[in-house]
Image (cartoon, rainbow, N blue to C red):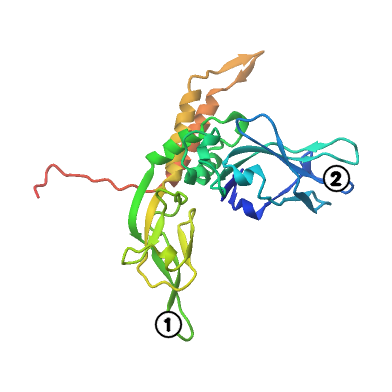
Amino acid sequence: MTVVLNRWVGDLNEGIQDQLLVGGAVYNFTGAGNPQLRVRLFNVSSWTVLTTVTWQTISTGIVQYAPQSSDPIITTAGRYIAQWYVPSMPSGNPQAGPLFEIVVADPTGATDFLTQGVGSVRTGMAWLIGRARQIIGDTNPASYVFADGAIQNALDIRRTDVRYVELYPDINFQQTGPVQWFNYFDVRYGGNWEVAGASDPPFITNFQWQDLNGINPYTFDYQTGKCVFSASQTPPVFLTGRTFDIYTACGDLLTDWARQVKLDFDFAVDRSPIQRSQKYAMLMDAAKDCYSKGRPRPIHMVRSDVIL
């Protein structure tokens, strides 16, 4: 299972830990009742209260959610609005935290990720979409500029479909015994791979084009492109999958965002100027910054004055 919680990507089965603040400051919740986590699908108005939340450190407001097999964010994929809630406080006034987003993909037994109202987005794109939102600053679920599908489209334009690219082996020298190879790295594309799906998963093969997951199990870091084998694996090792130039895609998104505000005009109210054009300029500056961090792209040039 993959979850994107605001700016964190991880395994929801491990639980969620957070710190509750009051007025933006650390607060001692000693004497308060048990905290709760309230969740609802993005297109649903009613809340589901998850009660398996405990105080990890009540004096500083650290809470921990322990997932249960029956919880909706375990059984149903989709985009959720979530909120920490403390119904019983010594003051008598309950405390509700700010809204945040949880995007869940590939839960056990879940239906297709996008049947829950988030558009026709591939399941394995959840973490990349969340990362793109972080880069461009489009993180408020209540006022998204771009739908998930629009972000996926922008990423797909900057996508590279890779077949059998060789991974770089990290040699592990032993004081005694043979050389071993456990770690392999994507040094050509630099990570940002789509998470494995049922129909077209990224996979690692040996020189005989055999999928090594059934021969020598491995874990793959989709963000960095690092592959770690459970046992030493002799090179060469090859990777097949989809990788994305996420910063260039975010530059495209920021440019599209800037187009939306370009027609906003400056005006003055009671001699106080309102500079709406600043927003366009700042979005374009952010787009230039993203483009500068994008992957280099080779181009083919032909000289007309040379006969080959």
Considering only vertical position in the picture, is 52 above or below 255?
below
Mark 1: few, some, or many residues within 10 Å (few <14, many ≥20)? few
Along the line of sight, which residue is nearer the eye, 102 or 171?
A: 102
| Three-letter amino acid code at the position of disc 2 | Gly
Kindly identify the residue that appears in the image at 60 percent across and 29 percent down: 143
Extreme top residue here?
Answer: 270
Tell me where residue 263 appears, x and y as whole percent.
Answer: 48, 19
Along the line of sight, which residue is nearer the eye, 287 or 87?
A: 87
Extreme bottom residue here?
Answer: 176
Q: Quadrant of residue 159?
A: top left
Q: Which residue is mark 1?
A: 178
| Three-letter amino acid code at the position of disc 1 | Pro
Instruction: Using the numbered discs, state the Cα–Cα distance from disc 2 to disc 1 in whole angstroms.
Output: 59 Å
Kindly identify the residue that appears in the image at 61 percent across and 19 percent down: 273
Considering only vertical position in the picture, is 284 above or below 128?
above
Kindly identify the residue that appears in the image at 45 percent across and 73 percent down: 232
Mark 2: few, some, or many residues within 10 Å (few <14, many ≥20)? some
Q: Which residue is mark 2?
A: 33
Residue 234 seen by the camera: yes
The local secondary structure at tag 1 comes to loop
